[in-house]
Amino acid sequence: MSESTNSPSGEVVQAYERYLQAFLTDDIETINSLVSYPLAYVGEGVVTLIDEFPVRPSVLREKTGWSDTINMSYKVVGISDTKAHLILESGTRVRDDGAPIEDINAFYAWTKTKNGWKIYAISDVRILR
């Protein structure tokens, strides 16, 4: 990403990249440190407030054979002093052999807290391959 980490949008990108790394390594403690609960999760036709992260990466690995997420493109599309929107425009979850499982994109709403930027709303779209 091209944003300076010293800029507000760069801070959001840096927090998102910490979240991505934590997701890839099943580091639920770090994920939770980057989420402001209750989390608004926008599902199929419903919005749910939840008190724990809706996906366990280890379960995703076990169910699908997911190994990595490649070809990710994301950017901050709106930001104020207290709120930001980051869009994961695209990404592909793949197995160890590189075979695609699904294409993903997502919307993340972030809030600025005394402990840094935290996710407070997520909506994702997953298209199986």
Image: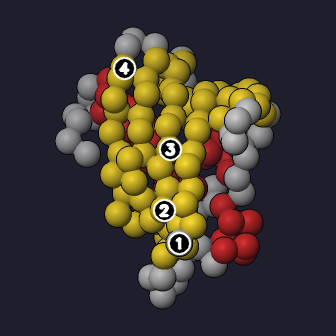
In this rendering, is residue 90 above or below 65?
above
Q: Which residue is label 3 attached to?
A: 106
Amino acid marked by disc 4: Ile
Residue at 35% of width from left, 23% of height from top? 78
Q: Is residue 39 visible?
A: no
Q: Secondary structure at mark 4?
A: strand
Nearest to N terminus: mark 1 or mark 3:
3
Q: Which residue is label 2 attached to?
A: 103
Amino acid marked by disc 1: Arg
Q: Which residue is label 4 attached to?
A: 79
Q: Secondary structure at mark 3?
A: strand
In terms of depth relative to the viewer, which is nearer, 28 or 49? 49
Amino acid marked by disc 3: Ala
Distance between the alpha carbons at the discs numbered 1 and 3: 17 Å
For residue 37, side relative to residue 82 (left or right): right
Label 1 Cα crowd, 10 Å radius (few <14 / some 14-19 / many 20+) = few
Distance between the alpha carbons at the discs numbered 3 and 2: 11 Å
In this rendering, the label closer to the viewer, 1 or 3: 1
Residues tagged 1 and 2 counted as in contact (Cβ below 8 A): yes
Residues tagged 4 and 3 counted as in contact (Cβ below 8 A): no
Label 3 Cα crowd, 10 Å radius (few <14 / some 14-19 / many 20+) = some
Picture mark count? 4
Nearest to N terminus: mark 1 or mark 4:
4
Q: In x, y percent, where is residue 107? A: 49, 37
Q: In x, y percent, where is residue 49? A: 76, 28
Nearest to N terminus: mark 1 or mark 2:
2
